[in-house]
Image (cartoon, rainbow, N blue to C red):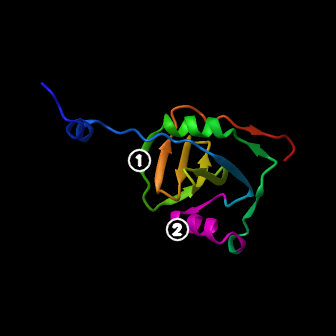
């Protein structure tokens, strides 16, 4: 039995592959808030006392972030209160800027650009410099 390419593609599940091209961790960000509040902090950082300069406290390899996103359980993000942000920043993927926050305690990355929760299967590998 022959199947056309169009029929095959309509049945095949397409897996999204995250390739992080650039990654910036902010020096200072909110520790929590509502989804709307956190999204606004990314858009107007000065009003929320967010320091968008590159952090010297946290270091994450872009390959590690990409691998973690690719292996995560992805769910749609709904408006909610969020607390316990470990760090936040932005990454570029296919020329598009994604604002994100990482919650180490629950092993979660929220992409506020795409409104997605990435429940990580393994802890995100990052280094935190002492004394910061």
Q: Is residue 39 magenta?
A: yes
Quarter of image, res 58: top right
Q: Answer above or below: position of 62 versus 84.
A: above
Question: Residue 112: horizontal and vertical position, in percent?
Answer: 53, 58
Residue under numbered circle 1: 75
Residue at point 54% right, 50% down?
94
Q: Answer above or below: position of 132 versus 3.
A: below
- Name the disc covering residue 39, or none: none
Residue under numbered circle 2: 36
Does 96 sit left or right of 5 as displayed?
A: right
Q: Answer above or below: position of 101 versus 74.
A: below
Q: Answer above or below: position of 96 versus 72.
A: below
Judged from the image, the secondary structure of the residue bearing numbered disc 1 is: strand
Between 10 and 124, which is closer to the camera in this rendering? 10
Q: Mark 1 vs mark 2: which is more N-terminal?
A: 2
Residue at point 62% right, 45% down?
21
Query: Furthest-left residue in view?
Result: 1
């Amino acid at each position: 039995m022959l199947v056309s390419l169009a029929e095959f593609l309509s049945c095949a599940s397409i897996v999204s592959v995250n390739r992080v091209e650039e990654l910036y961790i902010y020096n200072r960000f909110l520790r929590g808030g509502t989804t709307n509040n956190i999204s606004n902090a990314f858009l107007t950082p000065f009003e929320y006392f967010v320091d968008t300069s590159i952090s010297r406290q946290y270091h994450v390899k872009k390959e590690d972030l990409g691998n973690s996103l690719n292996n995560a359980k992805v769910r749609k993000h709904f408006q909610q209160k969020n607390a316990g942000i470990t760090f936040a920043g932005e990454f570029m993927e296919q020329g598009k800027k994604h604002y994100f926050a990482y919650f180490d305690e629950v092993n979660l990355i929220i992409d506020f650009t795409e409104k997605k929760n990435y429940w990580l299967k393994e802890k995100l590998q990052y280094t935190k410099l002492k004394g910061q």
